[in-house]
Amino acid sequence: MDAIVRSAPLIPPAPKVHPRPLGGSFVGELRIALEMGRSLIGAYCEEDFESLVTPYMFMGQHGLFVNNPTAVRHVLTSPKYRRPVKAARSLKPLVGEGVLMSEGEIWRRQRKSLAPVFTPAATGGLLPHFIAAGAGLTETLQGQNRANLAQAFHRATLDAVLRALFSRRADAEGALLADLARRYMEGPAHFNLMDFVAKGADDLLFMDGERRRIGKRWFTAVEALIAERRAKPHAEVRDLLDRLLAARTEDGAPLPDQEIRDQSSSMLAAGFETTSRLLFWAAYLLALDPDTQGRVRAEVLDFPVERVANLDDLKHWPLLRSVLFETLRLYPSAPMIARQAFEADEVLGCPVVPGCTITISPWVIHRHRKLWDAPTAFRPERFLDQPHPWGIEAFLPFGAGPRVCIGAGFALAEAQIILASLLAWFEIGVKSQRPVIPVASITLGPDHAPDFTLTPISQARP
Ligand code: HEM
């Protein structure tokens, strides 16, 4: 594993990179499966960070590992590719048939019905919820001189999503959802051997008991949220749940209960775990780099969170925003995006047969030696002169194409406000010298949750 280098520039921790490819034989493939079962980013070799496209065979199935940003965008926008059928194995127990998993006409209808919740104007209207979630976080941390911020961010981001999309606070029901999501991501969300061997979503499911058990409890908790709203409906449409309950199919019928549950579950699952990871890694990087932390704090104290009234106000924190982008580059919350070819194609001269899996790894692309200067260094300034980092082809933390993350603006606004709230109250550090190594399942989490030290910022408070 890489050591933390504390002199400038900071090279934050990452898992070891294998000197040579692990595959090429039955034993090699088994080793890849075991490494990837532990962590999806655990099997990369040096060559992967140099190559732009690599065809491979894995467990008898064709695959193409694509790092070339233009080719990646081709795959993510072409109708010849869809999310792999097998992705359902680890995701479906938590999100059912909601927008994350649906395809074709159903996906189009679901995505269209969600769009109004995520326009910039609608996101601007959610800022008070994010401010309340940030205030809730700092309140719970008052009086503590050390804290498990991984857990605290988990609660805070669930609180933000529940407030913004479901007009609920993260009370007992919320704590249960946070706990279930964490147990799922740290446990059965990891690939098991059968996920690699299986040909489809529904075969060889005998290792999936834990997925089903946690998924069932998660759905029960989401159904309770919906039942409560049905019992006490709002007078007018105020949030995502109202919108789903008011929505009608083309025949004028209300959406089936299962679709309302699956859409709600999808938004909850997609909406808080990813942002909570982003906040964790940003806090960790700032704890390792006190100088940058101090400069971000100066921005936040110059324009305090309480003054944020609209999305434009967030422009007062350019370095904070750049820190979040640099965090998403080094530690992308969604470290792996996969597609399956449904028609023959050609990518960078490599033939693609129907059924072929296209592996797109923001983890590798964001650290690729031919695509970035000092790819492993934490240098938030690289984003300072980039008002639209989406224009950087090799930067795709939220994916690309028609299935690009619908919640990107939501997540960034929320993360800026929660991190600003924390930094305005506390100087953060990490006591332990043990590096925190990222571990990937569906999201990119830490191998252990370090204790952060919290030193109150002495200043007059309004
Ligand atoms: C740091 C935070 C986040 C990151 C890094 C992230 C990343 C991603 C990525 C990479 C995808 C595309 C996956 C693919 O193409 O296969 C995606 C899709 C999606 N995200 Fe996010 N996400 C974040 C936050 C959110 C939030 C806050 C919400 C909602 C409240 C959300 C809702 C969704 C949904 C519904 C999709 C599926 C879109 C579709 O298939 O049409 N995400 N996200």
Image (cartoon, helix red, strand yellow):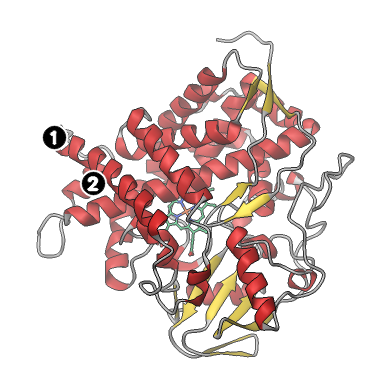
**Residue visible at 23% across and 39% down in the picture:** 224
Residue beneath disc 2:
243
Residue 44 in the image: state x and y as whole percent: 71, 67
Q: Nearer the viewer, residue 257 or 239?
A: 257
**Residue visible at 52% across and 63% down in the picture:** 191
Tell me the quarter of the picture where residue 61 sits. bottom right
Tell me the quarter of the picture where residue 369 sits. bottom right
Residue 276 in the image: state x and y as whole percent: 53, 41
Q: Amino acid at mark 1?
A: Ala
Q: Nearer the viewer, residue 137 or 317?
A: 137
Tell us which disc is closer to us: 2 or 1.
Answer: 1
**Residue visible at 71% across and 49% down in the picture:** 385
What element does badge 1 sit on?
A: helix
Residue 351 in the image: state x and y as whole percent: 59, 91
**Residue 197 can be seen, yes or no:** yes
Mark 2 → mark 1, Cα distance in angstroms: 16 Å
Residue 456 in the image: state x and y as whole percent: 67, 15
Above or below, 226 relative to 425: below
Residue beneath disc 1:
231
Q: Amino acid at mark 2?
A: Arg
